[in-house]
Amino acid sequence: MSRCSDACITRGAVVALAALALVAPASGAGTGAATQSSNPSRPALGFGKAATPAEIAGWDIDVRPDGAGLPRGRGSVAKGQEIYDEKCASCHGTFGESTDYMPIAGGVGSLKTAQPVRTTGSKLNYATTLFDYIRRAMPFTNPQTLAPDEVYALTAYVLNLNDILPSDAVLDQDSLPKLKLPNRDGFTTEHGFTRRDGKPDTRNVACMKNCTTQLRLSSEMPDYARDAHGNLAEQTRALGAVEGVNTVAPNAAPAANVVASVTLPAGAALAQKAGCMACHGVVKGAVGPAFRDVAAKYADAAQAEARLVAKVRSGGGGVWGAIPMPAQPQLKEGDARVIVQWILAGSK
Amino acid sequence: MNPGDARRRFLRRAAAIAGGAVSASAGENVGFREAAAQDLERNLPPHVPEWSRRLGAPILASPYGVPSKFEANVRRRESPGLTRTPQSSVAFTPLQNLFGIITPSGLHFERHHAGVPDVDPEQHRLMIHGLVRNPRIYTLDDIVRFPSVSRVHFIECGANSGMEWANVAVPTVQYSHGMIGCSEWTGVPLSTLLDEAGVDPRGKFILAEGADGASLTRTLPMAMALDDVLVVYGQNGEMLRPEQGYPLRLLVPGVQGVSSVKWLRRLKVGDEPWNTREEALHYVDLMPDGRHRQYTWIQEAKSVVTSPSGGQVILDRGYHEIRGLAWSGRGRVKRVDVSTDGGRNWKTATLQTPILPKALTRFRLDWSWDGGPALLQSRVIDETGYVQPTIRQLREVRGTRSIYHNNAIQTWRVDPSGEVSNVQVL
């Protein structure tokens, strides 16, 4: 009852304001106002402005499973591979296998097994969703920079990586929504979570006395993971009847509320902000080389700073392996310089 | 707590401040600890505290106030190794240290898919279009001008406790349950905006889209949209924090957090769901038969003891107040029971008012710890009569690989040493 009251009052207020508009001189030809609250032919309060078709077109990028919303365009698997190697492989791996993020290839048919391999290929039900997501959110550091033809090409290539499309395939606005993916029928909405009054899976009983006759400890934190989340003594307020467990030095005195301030060096902060750490580690390489390895390699190189600053911003490849580094044009030169200086100084 | 206990505890903390890892049993350190304690005792009776003998900081030392520096332990934290980049990651709310039911805005958990955009409210727009008679574009000025409402609701990520389906994986309640926050939200009912737009009778679903780099999208059923969904700009008396969607977000009460789209820029009315990436590749629940449940919107009733809880040490025997939080995405909390023996016997906890629908509810129970082993649990019953399930009951239906919607009863083991840890019992 009271759950509804706020909304009901507000909707009532809208009706009242609409009625006022009937007698207001500024209401113009507002003769239909009395019916507007439930089925308006124009806004009752009229705030904002009408969205023009051109304005809507610029933002209306969603694509539905039936293909509604697909722009005109076409792209081939071959073209997709070119773009992928340049802009995507640095994070997703040459064959879409990188597990740093959810892998985009492999595992088709594995979901019913004891070891389901969760990938874009094994989970996806409609190719339209793949197109929609690449178009709106990829590449991770420069979303919404791909032209429709490029998105078709990348969609085709990702499906090819999953052996769903042959390597000579071409996709366009007509063929893409017709594709039937392996997991098309792998989803269900027959469950209790779609509605507020949905039926729950479980039916526990609120027993109060002598409820469980046997009790088995099935899982506890292993000793080796004791400090996996750092020193828990520093993660809770040491005030009151409890304090944090010192997980760094067992049996020692727990830390008090000491002032712990973590200030990153400017280069490290900028590297984190710019997304460099998505592919590079400081000590250990991931997709790209470790920063310490970069520093070692260029320790005695002439013009190392200027060359690396240019490389960070324009991209490069062939030095550390098959996967090229994507260009980072959004990164200001001054910021790139601070990051490179930090890397060359040992990333400390 | 007797005076001797207080003294012992004070010395422990003094030692921690003075030297960090000093062995409590090492005799040669006692003098050092006593010296450190004497130094700290200079502010205790009969001495007059140093802050009573000098002028304090002026007003406006911190124009938008910040917590005391002594609260540095209380902060959002990342679970190590959980995600690859800090832009597409999660930071957890320190539930173990919160009072009442409101989460301070700066401690409300963070979950972003492409970082936190720096949105200029002057240049932010909300577009409403699709199957409507009057497609509209609103400025923040327009949105704030609409008749407003304020309501207290929780937001819980669908993946909260998702790491614990098969076994315990994280040490504290911050990591096991900290993808939840509860705020007083202020904004416009979505129904008001839909009335203004004039929804076509064919419109059965709404697509909500964010203005972040992920342009995150989620489908919302029209019945839910017209019920109690808000388009909000206010949180706990201030504008939304950037991490919470500044300057505008959707608030879908009782529904998994990803639906409360942040940095909301577009609402499109349609006649079918969209099957977006966040409802086909993620936020879908893998069942034992290999199929995924899709559009699992509702967050079912759940509760957890926040103190004492995993990663803490109970300092003394005797009286303790067991404290915790309970909530339900289907309405109000009706009752919470607490067990200290792993679920064999239960006592009904006291609920703190107000008890609001789809909001956190604080519960408390008096307990006397005898120094022996204990297994602490809480079990919520919501106003629909639904009883929070055991992990065994959930696994019987959903297996251990579904990631989302783990609302099992949580067990904390109390060791005779006082240390509390995360365990599961079957």
Image: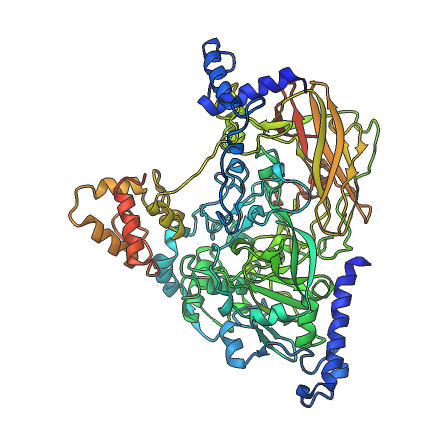
Residue in view at x 49 percent, y 69 percent: B123
Residue B260 position within the rendered picture, expressed as x and y whole percent measured from the top left: 62, 58
**Foreground residue among A284 and B135:** B135
> In the displayed structure, does residue A193 sit left or right of residue B88?
right
**Foreground residue among A121 and A101:** A101
Residue in view at x 48 percent, y 39 percent: B81
Does the image show residue B15?
yes
In which quadrant will I find the N terminus of chain B? top right
Residue B171 position within the rendered picture, expressed as x and y whole percent measured from the top left: 57, 32
In the displayed structure, B147 sits above or below B116; it is: below
**Foreground residue among A216 and A251:** A251
Residue B388 position within the rendered picture, expressed as x and y whole percent measured from the top left: 75, 41
In the displayed structure, A187 sits above or below B202; it is: above
In the displayed structure, A3 sits above or below B28; it is: below
Residue in view at x 52 percent, y 39 percent: B79
Q: Kindly give the residue lying farthest to the left in the view shown.
A: A302
Residue A42: quadrant of the picture: bottom right
Does the image show residue A315?
no
> In the displayed structure, does residue B203 sit left or right of residue A2?
left
In the displayed structure, A336 sits above or below B134; it is: above
Q: Kindly give the residue lying farthest to the bottom in the view shown.
A: A29
Residue A290: quadrant of the picture: top left
Residue A262 position within the rendered picture, expressed as x and y whole percent measured from the top left: 42, 39
